[in-house]
Image (cartoon, rainbow, N blue to C red):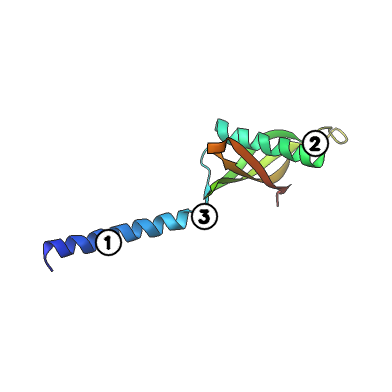
């Protein structure tokens, strides 16, 4: 093979591996490294607030414990949240963990709560 053919084969292999790598990430869940960031906390607070509106509950957001993100038409966030009941039951103020999924479309400045349930 001459240098030009070798270069084309090498470039094709490199581009193919980049495509496969990107395809694996798109649509897959990736860990969120900094769940204390202001944006992630804002999404967690939104999830609890929206759940309270929809279910007429009185949960109080405490913190984001962990989370993952997924690239879609926007971004999905699957967060494990700690929240307290609005009124402490028998003096027990312990937090409970919930799993919330929020779909964000940042270009529209919009968020949508798609799932909220007790964490397993």
Q: Residue at x 70, y 52 (%)?
A: 120
User: Element at badge 2?
Assistant: loop
As rendered, which of 23 and 58 lies closer to the eye? 23
Q: Is residue 87 left or right of residue 10?
A: right
Q: Which residue is mark 3?
A: 27
Furthest toward the top, the residue is 38
Q: Is residue 22 left or right of residue 34?
A: left
Q: Which quarter of the figure is the N terminus placed in? A: bottom left
As rendered, which of 108 and 48 lies closer to the eye? 108
Q: Which residue is mark 2?
A: 85
Q: Residue at x 82, y 38 (%)?
A: 56
**Residue 49 in the image: x percent, y percent?**
72, 35
Furthest toward the left, the residue is 2
Q: Is residue 30 visible?
A: yes
- Which disc is residue 104 wearing? none
**Residue 85 in the image: x percent, y percent?**
80, 36
**Residue 20 in the image: x percent, y percent?**
39, 60
**Residue 74 in the image: x percent, y percent?**
54, 45
Q: Which residue is mark 1?
A: 12
Q: Earlier in the sequence, mark 2 or mark 1?
A: 1
As rendered, which of 48 and 119 lies closer to the eye? 48
Q: Look at the numbered discs 1 and 3 and tell me whether their residues touch, using CB distance below 8 Å.
A: no
120 is higher (above) or lower (below) than 105: below
**Which quadrant of the structure image shows residue 63?**
top right
Structural distance between the alpha carbons of marks 1 and 3 = 24 Å
Structural distance between the alpha carbons of marks 2 and 1 = 56 Å
Furthest toward the front, the residue is 108
User: Element at badge 1?
Assistant: helix
Q: Residue at x 17, y 63 (%)?
A: 6
């Amino acid at each position: 093979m001459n240098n030009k053919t070798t270069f084309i084969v090498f470039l094709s292999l490199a581009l193919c591996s980049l495509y496969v790598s990107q395809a694996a990430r798109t649509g897959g869940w990736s860990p969120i490294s900094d769940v204390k960031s202001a944006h992630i906390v804002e999404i967690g607070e939104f999830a609890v607030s929206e759940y309270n509106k929809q279910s007429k509950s009185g949960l109080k957001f405490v913190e984001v414990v962990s989370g993952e993100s997924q690239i879609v038409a926007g971004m999905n966030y699957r967060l494990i949240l700690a929240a307290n009941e609005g009124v402490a039951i028998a003096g027990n103020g312990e937090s409970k963990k919930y799993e919330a999924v929020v779909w964000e479309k940042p270009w529209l400045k919009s968020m949508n709560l798609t799932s909220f349930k007790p964490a397993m």
